[in-house]
Amino acid sequence: MMAQRKVVRFSTHLAYDAFKGRAKELLGRPVKPELKPFCAFCFAKVNRGYRIRDVVSDNFTNYEVFHVEMDTLCKACALSFKVPELRCRIEQGDTITVVSGFYITDGNYRALQREELADALFNPPEPPFVICITSSPTKNRHLLYRSPVNYSKDGFFVQFNENTLFFHRPKMEKIFVSMKKLIEYGFKPWNIRTGFYGRGKKLEGEAEGAEKELMTIRGDPIFDLLIFLIGGEKDSE
């Protein structure tokens, strides 16, 4: 009999198992809600939780993700908004290392440097998982809460900056190969992004076939993600 797959509705809950050992350090003591006794993000019942104002920083602006009639977060959601690794920041003492992304599986977190992103997308972990990528790590973005939990390795969602993108792995892999082929021919990511390969220059053979593949998604946000994977602009926004 096949083992039943764990079902997790919220990415914040998936992340909790990876960081729960730091909950007391990062969150302090829970308090009783002043408003309705439910988590303002996931709507779980909360007898004692963590005030939103104590969890997010003064720079946080996306308060629309929290229910207006609730002022408290459950432990899982509060911890996910508090952990710096989920904003692509690895803090070790006074040293902060920024990374380009991360993925989370059941109880595990893995930071991803830019050169590791393509492998993570084309060889994703076993479900359930979440993958988040930022083109500007220094912007200190909250990425996790935006991202759905994935249950397929062939078609899944990727949180790329503020965009939640559907990634059809077989199709994207074919297009990514076409991009790399054009790089091998000496073209730059800028040429691939714009479709301009030089005044009066005509693509032929494999290069022409590769460009035809790219034309099917150029202008789509998923195209910006693929450009970022091959070493294009650091910030595609």
Image (cartoon, rainbow, N blue to C red):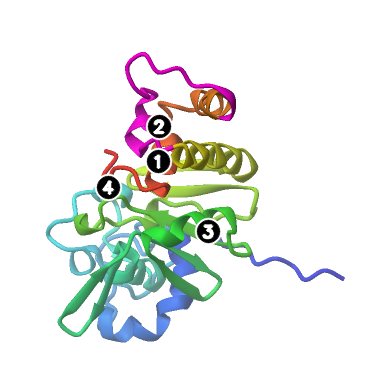
Q: Which mark is first along the chain, 2 or 4?
A: 2
User: What residue do we see at 26% from left, 58% from top?
Assistant: 137
Amino acid at the residue labelled 3: Asp
Disc on res. 119: 3
Looking at the rendered structure, the secondary structure element under dot 1 is helix
Q: Is residue 43 visible?
A: no
Q: CA distance from mark 3 to mark 4?
A: 18 Å
Q: Quadrant of the C terminus?
A: top left
* Residue 38 vs residue 229, the one in the foreground: 229
User: Viewer-nearest of labels 4 and 2?
Assistant: 2
Q: Which mark is first along the chain, 4 or 3?
A: 3
User: What residue do we see at 24% from left, 63% from top?
Assistant: 52
Q: Which mark is first along the chain, 4 or 1?
A: 1
Q: Position of residue 140 (x, y in %)?
A: 22, 59
Q: CB under 8 Å between callouts 1 and 2?
A: yes
Q: CA distance from mark 3 to mark 1?
A: 15 Å
Query: In the orientation shown, which residue stands out farthest toward the left?
Result: 58
In this rendering, the answer to whether 141 lies above or below 199 is below
Stretch in magenta: 186-206
Q: CB under 8 Å between callouts 4 and 2?
A: no
Q: Which mark is first along the chain, 2 or 1?
A: 2
Q: CB under 8 Å between callouts 2 and 3?
A: no
User: What residue do we see at 87% from left, 71% from top?
Assistant: 1
Residue labelled with disc 4:
234
Q: Position of residue 147 (x, y in %)?
A: 44, 52
Looking at the rendered structure, the secondary structure element under dot 4 is loop
Residue labelled with disc 2:
192
Q: CA distance from mark 1 to mark 2?
A: 8 Å
